[in-house]
Image (spheres, helix red, strand yellow):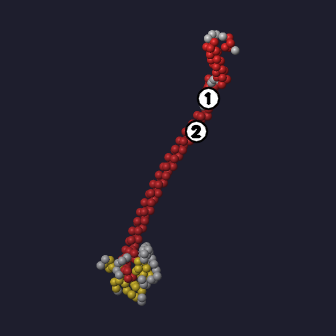
Amino acid sequence: MTFIPLQEAVDITQKEDIKQVDNLRERILDLEKKAKNIDSISNFMMWITGGVLLGFLFTSVLISLDYFRYNQERYEKFIAAMKMVEDNMVKKDQIDNLQNLENNNEKILNCMKIKKSFSVQCFD
Amino acid sequence: MAKIIFSDVFQENADGTITPKRNVQIGAATIGSQITFGKGVSFGGVNIFDFKDLPVEADDVGGVLVIKGFYKV
């Protein structure tokens, strides 16, 4: 067993205190490094986000310009297509007339079949 | 001068602090028996926690235990 007098005990305490201070200093430097890293990562992410937003904005502007530039042309084409469809449509009156005509023709044919000859009575 | 075991001089509390069981003097500092202290506190330049559980060399002077040193095992 070694005897440690009080003065030596004081020196030992001081050495321990210095060790603790060095430890704390290292930890502080470590934390500062980590903080710098986080800072640069967050800057990088901010730039990426900014770039994506700018790209989105640019694309939106291009699409909008294109849309409004050719809007009139697209409208006119649409109207022309609608007119074409309308022209090709058979109206209800025409269908009814054709139907009536067909019915009449059928009546006349049946009448002629019954009479077994061409008779004026079938046209009444 | 007498060699005294650490636990006869200081009581270690559940929260890790230390309380002297009687009035103790280290260097120029006197610690009363009602004082509780934690790690990092020095008396007379000595941090008791650095010498925890080591036998103490001390003298009883007028009811105050005057610490002269510690024994390293």
Residue B27 position in % (x across, y down): 41, 81
Q: Does A5 sit left or right of A69 as displayed?
A: left
- Closer-to-camera residue (A10/A120): A120
Amino acid type, residue under disc 2 in the picture = Val
- The quadrant in which the C terminus of chain B is found is bottom left
Q: Secondary structure at mark 2?
A: helix
Q: Residue furthest left?
A: A1
Q: Residue at x 39, y 68 (%)?
A: A19
Whether discs 1 and 2 lie on one chain: the answer is yes
For disc 2, the marked residue is A61
For residue B7, say whether it is visible: yes
Chain bearing tag 1 is A
- Residue B6: which quarter of the image? bottom left
Q: Is residue B64 above or below residue B54?
A: below
For disc 1, the marked residue is A78
> Which one is earlier in the sequence, the residue at label 1 or at label 2?
2
